[in-house]
Each structure stands twice: as C-alpha cells, then as structure tokens.
Image (cartoon, coloured by chain):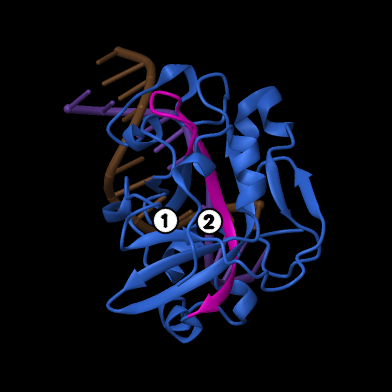
Chain colours: A blue, B brown, C purple
Amino acid sequence: MNPRPPRSFYRRDAVTVARELLGLLLVRQLQGKRLSGWIVETEAYLGVEDLAAHTVGGRRTARNASMWGDGGHAYVYFTYGMHYCCNVVAGRAEQPIAVLLRSLQPWEGVQDMRIRRLRARRDTDLCSGPAKLTQALAIDRGLDGTDLVDGPDLFIERPRAIARPWGRIVASSRIGVQYAGAWASKPLRFHFADNPHVSRP
DNA sequence: CCCGTGATTTAT
DNA sequence: TAAATCACGGGG
C-alpha cells in the first residue's frame, strides 16, 4: 500500500496543490478492486475573486458546499445534464479553493475502465478529460465530500519510488471558462509536456 | 462546427 | 415558477 499525502499537503494554495498533484496516483476502490491513474493534468480554481470558480463572489450553495470545507476532500459536481467532474479541495475550511482533475494516465484496472468507457477507441481516450476520468473510475455525486486522506473509496497516493520520469510541467489557460473575462487567460492549468493522456496539447 | 442533457442557479 | 446557464464529450 502506497502512502497518502497528509492533510497538510492539501491545506495550501490551489496553484501549489495543482502543480504537486501532477505525478500522484488517484485511486478508486470499488467492489474490492482498484481503479487508478496517474494525475497528468489539473486546473486551479482560486475562490471568491476567481470569475471562473463556482465560489465566485462568495457563492455558497448545496452543490458547492464541499468546496467550503477543509482541504483533502473531494468536490464532485454534475454538469451539462450528463457529466461529473472531480475536484480536490485545497486550503482550509471557509477558504473555497479547489483543483479540478482533468486527465489521468490509466494505471490499475484498465480493463474495467474500457468497459465503463465503451466510446473510447484508444487507451488515451479513457481518462483524457474531467468527465472521462470520472466515468472511467465510477466517480459520481455520491463521492462528493469524501475524505481523500482517510476515506476507503477514493483517495490519492504518493508512492515512495517514482513510477516514471514525468518531465516538464507546462502552464496554460484553463479550458471551458471563456466567460470569465481576465480570469479566462490566467495560466492556471498545469500538465506534463508531451504526455499523450492530456485532454489537449 | 453543433448538439444532447437535466441539475443548478438566477431572474421574475 | 420560468428561463438561462453550464470547469463537457462525441460526432461531423
């Protein structure tokens, strides 16, 4: 069993957490089996001032409640009538910042992922997008608020030995937030250069 | 390019 | 109550 980062890992600013999540393993434990993938793409959402964040202007609703909680928990939301997206909550309670998990490099349970993602033609289609990875790993609103540090169903591991050399980290503007004015172009998306599992180059 | 899809949010 | 929105994915 790989060690998990402690609570203090998550209780930091969203950009730091977004960058340091790259190369860690997201694990979904389901029916006694592990589905997992290496985190290769993230986006930071900076809270009340961030025009692209669900908590902009201090918005606090039933949907985004877990974003207001302590770091190290999941914020899972439903959108476009059919998709779930999974965030890692950063900072401390009452500091509504988070990191959207955008892409994984599939690792364990790839065969199960293929069954959950029948539309994926290649393995680079399995988890190369925020709603693709939730479908592949069976993450839905039932996991909203789950504890990534201590929970049994969804968590993050940081193996002692590095699995592979990941290479350079690239920063770019976030995807799908064109409405956010000046915040749309800030370099808050992070991914490994030249990784084929990233949602788009 | 366009559209499906329906919960969530905001405006009356 | 009603209307608009949407941190997307898949197909042309």
Residue A95, image quadrant: top left
Q: Residue at x 51, y 52 (%)?
A: A5
Residue A137, image quadrant: bottom left
Circle 1 residues within 10 Å: few <14, some 14–19, many ≥20: some
Q: Residue at x 38, y 56 (%)?
A: A82
Asked if A189 appears above or below A22 in the picture, the reply is above
Visible in this render: residue A177? no
Image quarter hosting the N terminus of chain A = bottom left
Mark toward the viewer: 1 or 2: 2
Asked if A101 appears above or below C2 in the picture, the reply is below
Residue A24, image quadrant: bottom right
Task: Identify the residue position indicated by label 1 in the image.
Answer: A83
Visible in this render: residue A35? yes
Q: Residue at x 77, y 44 (%)?
A: A171
Residue A176 is inside the magenta segment: no
What are the residue bounds of the magenta stretch? A90-108
x and y, in percent, of residue A46 in the image: 57, 29
Amino acid at pointer 1: His
Asked if disc 1 and disc 2 are in contact, CB closer than 8 Å, the reply is yes
Q: On the picture, is B1 further left or further right than A52?
A: right
Asked which secondary structure carries label 1, the reply is strand
Circle 2 residues within 10 Å: few <14, some 14–19, many ≥20: many
Residue A94 is inside the magenta segment: yes
Chain letter belonging to callout 1: A
Task: Identify the residue position indicated by label 2 in the image.
Answer: A130
